[in-house]
Image (cartoon, grey):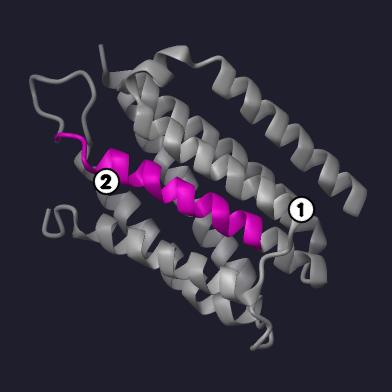
Amino acid sequence: MKTIVNVLVACCTLMLATACALLSPLNLDPGAREAAGITLQTYAVLQQAVLVYGYLPDCTTPPVVHICRQHQAWRRLQTAERAATQAIAAAAPVLNATEIDTGQIVAALGAIETVREALAEAQSSWNRAAP
Amino acid sequence: MEQGRTMTLERTLALLRTILTDVPAAIATGAELIRLINNAYTRLQHSATHALSPEEISTLVEEIKSSSAQIQSIDPHT
């Protein structure tokens, strides 16, 4: 299970980092919409990794399972994920070219990056703690 | 810029192929994982060659909202 989640997180992180790297130098020219689409696709996968983490059993002292969900990390993830989804929803009309961009895309990318960081932190904390 | 972006995406997809080849343990124990990764891979391939239509973006945003609702429903009061 640990290997599975690690691989999933690694794949998501890889794809998201690449998608963000693709988008950042494009600013908001027409190509940005295409690149933002890639980022959204990747974020949808990243959410699955968050779900996997969320369904893990809570960590206890002493530990009874090798892989568990840390309370603080999970709260951070939930908060970051909620903010990212709200930012994405706000950016959707811009991506669909029905609204003028006033910073929604950049805000969504920043929020998505926060989720990625929170998930990576959760992953690293269990890697340190697990036997 | 376009060529550089395409090259980067190609390298990413090539790396994903390598990852999928190198995780036989995960393949044996995580059918769901492989389904998710394959799905992501297919989506990225599609995005690499097609700009998303407004309908596709709307559908994707709805999927994201749905997954978010699932995430927020896990232990909402803890």
Q: Nearer the viewer, residue A53 or B3?
A: B3
**A1 relative position to A23: left or right:** left
Q: Quadrant of residue B40?
A: top right
- Relative placement, left or right, of A62 versus A120 is left
Amino acid type at image mark 1? Thr
Q: Which residue is mark 2?
A: A74
Question: Can see residue A110?
Answer: yes
Say which residue appears at 58% left-offset and 22% top-offset. B19
Q: With respect to residue A131, does A38 lie above or below?
A: below
Nearest-to-viewer mark from 1 and 2: 1
**Badge 1: few (under 14), some or many (20 or more) residues near its Cα, within 10 Å?**
few
Q: Residue B13 magenta-drawn?
A: no
Magenta part of the protein: which range? Answer: A37-57
Q: Secondary structure at mark 2?
A: helix
Q: A121 or A29, which is in the foreground? A: A29
Instruction: Say what amino acid the circle numbered 2 marks.
Output: Trp
Query: For this view, does A92 lie left or right of residue B75?
Result: right
Quadrant of residue A100 in the image?
bottom right
Mark 1 to mark 2 CA distance (whole Å): 36 Å
Residue lying furthest bottom: A99
Magenta stretch, main secondary structure, is: helix
Q: Percent x, y for residue A101?
A: 68, 82
Residue at the spot of label 1: B49
A53 in magenta: yes
- Residue lying at 42% horizontally and 26% vertically, measured from the top left: A6
Pick the front one: A122 or B63: B63
